[in-house]
Amino acid sequence: TNSEQIKSIRAANREAVKTQSEFPVSWTLDRSKSVQITYKGFLAGRKPSAVSGQPRLYYDRSKPFEKSVPFYNTYQSKTIIKKPLSYVVPQGWWKVIDLLKINQVNMRRLTKDSTVEVEIYRIEDFKASARQYESHHINTEVKVSTGKKQIKFRKGDYLIPMNQIANRFIMEVLEPQGDDSYFAWNFFDATLGQKEGYSSYVFEDTAEEFLKSNPDIRSKLEERKKTDTAFAKSGAAQLNYVYQQSPYFEPDLMRYPVYRIIK
């Protein structure tokens, strides 16, 4: 029967996703491909509004029509990400943890504090929608840089192995560049705001000594001044640039708080 065939195909797909090595997480509409479908409707007209007396839109049920219209239903993968061995989500992100549990993601908690080399993402750029909807806004056009770092995780943090039937879901929600990721739905916005700063009066002397000890940073500063007129005219902007390159800069700012174990 068809039902048995559907069950068989679904079971095969669920098994295949366990070993799939990479996943698309964002897509773009392919406008070069479409099919024609019949659109049925009623002709629109205008008549005086009983409320305002001004012309209002209405659809004339006595004038049905049909027309052939293109239907675009083909998408191409825009961003494809290789699957890690595991993800680690710190327990403090409990809203995300709860959503993963609701969607039956298999996880286990670390039984002791552990230092692990992981791949990290840093959010380099994104665009936030101007208006909220249902207490959320959308972050789009996300750009990230990657690096490796030894991170100390705490007992109780969550390890998510990537050998399960939920792999596709996990990738789509935990990869920050995913169209429907938890980062896109602003669950991680707390990492995007700078919480620490400096006193210009105090940091000026520190910055001077830092530049003497780091001539490469001094060279980058001077090069930026040559190419950015507004930057060259702003002492505050230049001091902030040095601060961002210094060891005093807030290390977790813009660092995506979901980590990838890749080996």
Image (cartoon, rainbow, N blue to C red):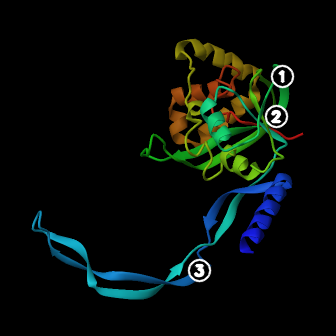
Q: Is residue 110 left or right of residue 63?
A: right
Whether residue 231 appears in this view of the structure is yes
The residue identified by callout 3 is 34
Quick one: label 3, few (<14), some, or many (20+) residues within 10 Å? few
Left or right of 84 on screen, residue 3: left
Residue 223 lies, in percent from the top left, at 66, 39
Q: CA distance from mark 3 to mark 1?
A: 52 Å
Q: Where residue 182 appears, x then y in whole percent?
A: 61, 43
Task: Give SS at disc 3.
Answer: loop
**Label whose residue precedes the other's in the sequence (3 or 1):** 3
Rendering quarter of residue 205: top right
Q: What's the residue type where badge 2 is placed?
A: Val
Crowd tier of the residue under label 2, counting other residues whose Cα lies within 10 Å: few below 14, some 14–19, many 20 or above:
many
Q: Please, what is the three-letter code of the amino acid marked with disc 3?
A: Ser
Could you tell me which residue is drawn at 56 percent across and 27 percent down?
A: 194
Evaluate whether residue 176 shows in this view.
no
Q: Quick one: 193 or 112, which is closer to the camera?
A: 112
* Mark 2 lies on residue: 118
Dot 1 crowding, Cα within 10 Å, few <14, some 14–19, many 20+: few
Local secondary structure at mark 2: strand
The residue most toward the top is 202
N-terminal of the pair, mark 3 or mark 2, is: 3
Cβ atoms at labels 3 and 2 below 8 Å apart:
no
Residue placed under numbered mark 1 in the picture:
114
Vertical comparison of 234 with 163: above or below = above
Element under disc 1: strand
Residue lying at 65% horizontally and 26% vertically, measured from the top left: 92
Please tell me which residue lies in front, 92 or 122.
92
Q: Residue 251: where, in percent of width, then height?
A: 68, 25
